[in-house]
Image (cartoon, rainbow, N blue to C red):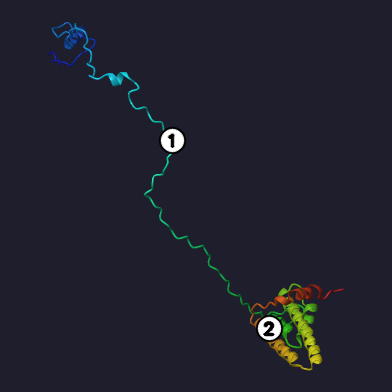
Amino acid sequence: METKRGKYDTNPLDPDFVKNAEKDRGEGGNGPVTQPVRSATREVGSAANEEARANIYSETPTRRYDKATLETSYPSVFVPPTYAPPAPYQPAQFTAPPITQRPGKRSVAGIGLSEKWATVLPYTPYLGVIGSLVELFLVPRSEPKVRFHAAQGLALHVAILVLGTAFSVVGAVSGTTAGGSLFKLASFIFLIVSMIRVAKGKPHHISALSEPAQWFNDHIEFKKS
C-alpha cells in the first residue's frame, strides 16, 4: 500500500523533485508576472520659496564659542553646609600604678642580713653612715637593690652632714641656732620616712642625690687580693 505524501514530504533523490519545486514556486505555471515600469520617474516637488536654500548667506552665521568668556558666573543654588571643626584627638593618658614590692626575707650575700633590714639600715639616723659603708664594702654587685639603697643612704647622710655644718657656722656667726635646730629635726623626720617607705617596698629615689650615689656605688667595693 502506497503511503500518502503531503506537500512538504519531498525527497531530493526523487526524479520529480525539480518539477514539483518549480510548480510550488509558480515557475512555469500560471502565476502573475512582474510588469516593467514604462513611464519616467516623477520628480519630487520643490518648495515654493527656494531663495533661502539657494543663498547660503541668508541665514544668521554660526556663533563661535571657542574663545568666548563668561562675563558673569552663574549664581550657584547650592550652598555647602558649614561644619564645626572636629575636636583634636587626645589619647587617654594611662598612668601605671606604682609597683609595691616588699623586701624579701632572704639573706643578702656578704652580710647575712635579710633583704628588708639591709635596705632599711642605710637610712637609720646616726647609724646609717656606718651601715652604708659596711654594705658597700661587703655586698657584691649581684645585689643591685641593696647596693643602691646603701649608696643613696650614704649620699643622704653626707648631704645632711654638710648642710648641718653650714647651719652651725651660720648660727655661730649670727648668734642663733634656730635654723640649725629646724634642719636637724627635718633631717631626722626625712630619714624616718625613708625607712618606712623602703620597708614597705615603695620606690624611694632622691633625684638630687643621683650623681653622688652613683659615684659611691661605682667606687666603693671590697676588692679581694
Residue 189 placement (x, y as % from top left): 68, 88
Which quadrant would residue 163 be assigned to in this image?
bottom right
Q: Residue at x 45, y 34 (%)?
A: 67
Per the rendering, the mark at residue 23 is none
> Badge 2, how many Cα within 10 Å: few under 14, some, many 20+?
many
- Disc 2, SS: helix
Per the rendering, the mark at residue 68 is 1
Give the answer, above or below, for where 211 lies relative to 48: below
Relative to 106, 4 lies left or right: left
Give the answer, above or below, for where 175 lies relative to 211: below
| Amino acid, disc 1 | Ala
Q: Nearer the viewer, residue 206 or 9?
A: 206
> Badge 1, how many Cα within 10 Å: few under 14, some, many 20+?
few
Q: Residue furthest right?
A: 225
Q: Dot 2 corresponds to which residue?
A: 194
Residue 51 placement (x, y as % from top left): 28, 19
Relative to 173, 102 lies left or right: left
User: Is residue 46 among what the camera can see?
Assistant: yes
Q: Nearer the viewer, residue 146 or 180?
A: 180
Q: Residue at x 38, y 50 (%)?
A: 78
Give the answer, above or below, for where 188 lies relative to 29: below
Q: Nearer the viewer, residue 159 or 134?
A: 159
Q: Quadrant of the C terminus?
A: bottom right
